[in-house]
Image: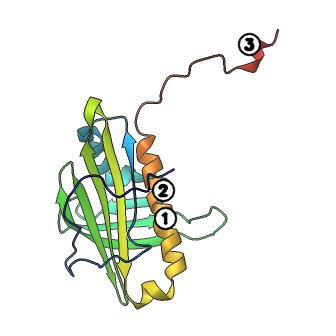
Amino acid sequence: MRDQRPWPISEPVPRGRRGEIAAAHPLPVEGCVEVAMSVERLWEVFLDVPAWSQWNPCIWRATVRGGELREGAKLVWAFNPIRPLYLYKLPAVAEIVELFAHQRVTWEVSAPGFHALHSYRFAELDSGCCRFGSWEVAEGPAFHALRRFWLAHFRFVCDESLAGARDLGPRPPVTGTGDRRARSG
C-alpha cells in the first residue's frame, strides 16, 4: 500500500526541541503516496484537525489547544487500535515543533523514557496532484522496552494516514462492463 521509498525531495531531517533522533533500522517508519488534488487543497484539509478522523482511519479524535495548528501549539488526539478487535484508544499529546505551509508539519512527543518525532510531508507535483508522506522515529527506554508494539503502531499510523490521504482525491471513473448481470443474457 505505502510507497516504501524514502521521501524523494531533499530536505532537512525533522527536528524537535530536544533535537534530532538518530534513526537506525527499522526507523524511520516512512512512506508516501500521490494524492489527486493540489497541495494547497490537501493542506487546507490537513489544517482542520478536528476533521482528521473523517479521512484518517488511525485517528479516533483530534484537537489543537487554542484551535489553530501552529508551531508551539499542543496537539491532543487519540488513536484507534491497530486491529479492530483490540479494545483500546491510545491517547497522545504533542507539541508542534515545525510547521512549513504546504511542506511539512512535525510534532514531538516527550514522556518519561519516550521521545518521538512524527512528520507529515507535502509536495506539489505536476498536473494538479501532490505527494503526501509520513515519517516517524522514536528513542528511549520506554520505546525500546515496547519496541514491537511501537513499530507496529508506527506502521499502522503511516499506512492508514497515507491511504486516507490518497482517498481524499477524486476517484477514477469506472470503465468497462463490470456488472456481470449486464453481460449475461
According to the image, label 3 marks what residue?
Answer: 182
Horizontal and vertical percent position of residue 175: 57, 19
Under mark 3, the amino acid is Ala
Which element type, helix, strand or loop, lies under badge 1?
A: helix
Give the mark nearer the N terminus: 3 vs 2. Answer: 2
Which element type, helix, strand or loop, lies under badge 2?
A: helix
Q: Residue at x 34, y 73 (%)?
A: 93
Q: Which mark is residue 155?
A: 1
Q: Residue at x 46, y 62 (%)?
A: 157
Crowd class of label 3 (few under 14; some 14 to 19; many from 20; radius 10 Å): few
Left or right: where 117 falls relative to 150: left
According to the image, label 2 marks what residue?
Answer: 159
Q: Are marks 2 and 1 in contact (CB under 8 Å)?
A: yes
Is residue 105 visible from the viewing direction of this image? yes
Under mark 1, the amino acid is Arg
Closest to the observer, 88 or 8: 8
